[in-house]
Structure formats: C-alpha cells, structure tokens
Image: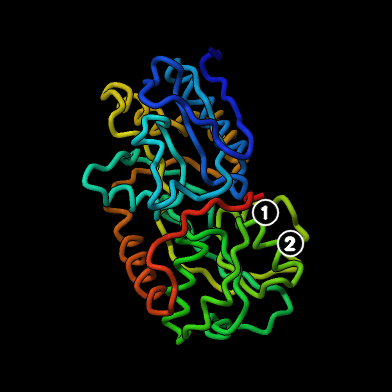
C-alpha cells in the first residue's frame, strides 16, 4: 500500500479496482475524465491533498476515452470500483436520473479565474473559437461551417453547439459537419491546421492553453461565449460511509483556506472553491434536454454514444 497522500497515475485507460472493496481497505480511488484537456497535474494535486487531509492512501486513475461514465454502460460507482470522480455535467445528470443514483454531488466546485466571472462563482463558458482570419462575426455565420467537438458526453463542446446551431436555423446537414476530434486540445489543433472551421472550447481549457502557448492567440480568436454553465461536478460514491463523505466534503471546502494552497492552485488558474448544489445543474438539464431533442430532430441518435474513443491527447 502506498503512503497516504501519494497518488498513482495510470496510463491511458483506468485500472479496474475490485468491486465491493471499501476505501478503508485499499485507499481512496479517484478518477478524472477531464484529462488531458485539463492537466492531470491538477487532479494529482487534489488527490495528494485529499490523501494528506484524510490520512488515507489515494489512487488517481486517468480516463481519456470519455468525459464521464458513458450512458448505457455499467458505471464504476455502481460496481464499487470508484469513490470520487471529476467529469462533465451530462454524465452526472444521467447518473442522477436513475431510480437509485450511484453518486452524489460534493457540494463545492472549483472556481477558475475568468474576467467574466466577477462574482467568483463555480462556472465556466463554451468559447466559440475560429481561426484569426476566418470571416465569421457571429454564430449565425458558422451554421454551415465544419465544426469540431471533444465528445458526446460534453455540454460545452457538443450539446451547446447543437442547441445554438438549431436556434440559428441549422438543418439536418449540420450533424454531418460535426467532427469528433477526441478532445478540446485536438479541436484546437484542428483549427490551427484548418481541418475544421470552428469549435466550442471549455473556457478553462482555453485559458490554460493561451498561457502555455502564447502563439495560439496569434492564430485563433474567440467569437463569443456560450453560458455560463456550472463548473464540472466533483462527485462521490453514494454508499461511501457517512463519516468519510463528511470528511471529503470538509476537505474540499477547505481547499483554498491557506495562502500556500491558493498560491499552488493558481498554477492551474484556480482561485478557490465555492458552494454548489444539485439545483445549480438545472440550467444544464434544460439545455441538455433541448439539445438532445434538437439532435434527434436533426437526425442524430437518441442517446449518447458509448463506444470506445481514441485517446483525447
């Protein structure tokens, strides 16, 4: 067993823990579905922090094929193979729709630095990005463009685009111009190469890339933003011991309480945490319902694809 606070970073696919084992036996099992678009180093930091705070061994798993547990497939929480997850809102909403939801929301969300978020809320935006020289000046100019998206479990990169395009008069040919790029980072590369004309990029991902690759600003521009949306949820397995769930909640709520922690978190443009409730995701539930209805009306499938994906790298 590893020391408390030390995380194991798996390869492209997460290791499957044995079903039914409790975190007290083999440590706390965490999995991010948001890497590499959001750096794995952030989730490694959070994993180590929780291990130190709780005095438990921790294990970080990396899933790069989906933005959350795919709809229609067995999920690792029901199987008892996972304790904490970081993923996009649609999979959280789908899990909550079950008669016996296997997860519950940790009532805090990360707050990322964004000039549009003066109130310090746990939100983000879908930034519509095009090449610098693209003539588009509004979303309406992109209805007939070639779009890239990260995956079909994502509101920011996929469902927000479908909904907005339908509102601007897109017809059944629109879905045929949507290209599955595998991640927000791949969509940005596709824009730079001219493979696609537009993409909706998670504003946090874009801000981190702007900082890491300043040349990107010279090649691409943001047309405008959709949202705000509630930040991607942090969830925990519903049948974890009540004492552990309380300790997890307290630890995450205290993430930004010291100056040292706040300085560390700024590496990933995180300014702290803020309270969240399940009701905060009602705006995404409404957007997701409408987008899925419009997707079907445009000739798309009725449910999110669950087939394995290429790596999001």
The residue carrying pointer 1 sits among few (fewer than 14), some (14 to 19) or many (20 or more) residues within 10 Å by Cα, namely some
Q: Answer above or below: position of 135 versus 11.
A: below
Give residue 136's quadrant in the image. bottom right
> Is residue 307 rendered to the left or right of residue 264?
left
Q: Earlier in the sequence, mark 2 or mark 1?
A: 1
Q: Which residue is mark 2?
A: 216
Q: Answer above or below: position of 29 versus 220.
A: above
Give residue 54's quadrant in the image. top left
Work out how far the residue at label 2 is from the one at label 1, CA to CA, in angstroms. 8 Å
Display coloring: rainbow
Residue 282 image point, x, y percent? 29, 58
Residue lying at the far left in this picture: please name it. 99
* Residue at the spot 62% in from the left edge and 46% down from the top edge: 36
Residue 168 image point, x, y percent? 46, 84
Q: Which residue is mark 1?
A: 209
For the residue labelled by badge 1, is the local secondary structure a helix, a strand or a loop? helix
The residue carrying pointer 2 sits among few (fewer than 14), some (14 to 19) or many (20 or more) residues within 10 Å by Cα, namely some
Of residues 305 and 188, which is closer to you in this image?
305
Q: Is residue 46 visible?
A: yes
Residue 195 image point, x, y percent? 71, 71
* Residue at the spot 67% in from the left edge and 49% down from the top edge: 313
For the residue labelled by badge 2, is the local secondary structure a helix, a strand or a loop? helix
Q: Is residue 117 visible?
A: no
Instruction: Please state the total of marks drawn on the protein image.
Output: 2
Residue 130, label in figure = none
* Residue at the spot 62% in from the left edge and 36% down from the top edge: 41
The answer to whether the residue labelled 2 contacts the one labelled 1, judged by CB atoms less than 8 Å apart, is: yes
Residue 63 image point, x, y percent? 55, 41
């Amino acid at each position: 067993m590893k020391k408390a606070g030390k995380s194991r970073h798996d390869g492209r696919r997460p290791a499957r823990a044995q079903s039914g084992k409790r975190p007290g036996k083999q440590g706390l099992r965490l999995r991010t579905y948001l890497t590499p678009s959001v750096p794995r180093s952030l989730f490694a930091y959070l994993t180590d922090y929780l291990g130190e705070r709780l005095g438990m061994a921790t294990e970080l798993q990396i899933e790069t094929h989906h933005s959350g547990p795919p709809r229609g497939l067995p999920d690792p929480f029901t199987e008892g193979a996972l304790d904490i997850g970081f993923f996009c809102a649609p999979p959280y909403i789908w899990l909550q729709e079950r008669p016996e939801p296997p997860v519950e929301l940790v009532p805090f969300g990360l707050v990322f630095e964004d000039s549009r978020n003066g109130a310090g809320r746990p939100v983000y935006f879908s930034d519509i990005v095009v090449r610098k020289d693209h003539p588009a000046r509004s979303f309406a100019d992109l209805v007939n463009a070639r779009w890239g998206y990260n995956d079909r479990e994502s509101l920011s990169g996929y469902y927000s685009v479908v909904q907005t395009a339908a509102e601007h008069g897109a017809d059944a040919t629109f879905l045929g111009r949507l290209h599955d790029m595998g991640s927000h980072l791949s969509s940005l590369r596709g824009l730079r190469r001219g493979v696609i004309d537009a993409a909706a990029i998670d504003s946090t991902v874009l801000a981190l890339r702007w900082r890491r690759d300043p040349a990107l600003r010279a090649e691409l521009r943001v047309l405008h933003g959709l949202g705000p949306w509630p930040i991607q949820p942090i969830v925990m397995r519903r049948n974890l011991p009540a004492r552990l769930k309380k300790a997890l909640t307290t630890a995450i709520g205290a993430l930004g309480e010291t100056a040292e922690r706040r300085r560390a978190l700024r590496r990933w443009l995180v300014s702290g945490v803020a309270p969240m409730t399940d009701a905060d995701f009602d705006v995404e539930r409404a957007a997701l319902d409408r987008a899925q209805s419009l997707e079907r009306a445009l000739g798309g499938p009725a449910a999110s694809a669950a087939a394995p994906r290429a790596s999001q790298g």
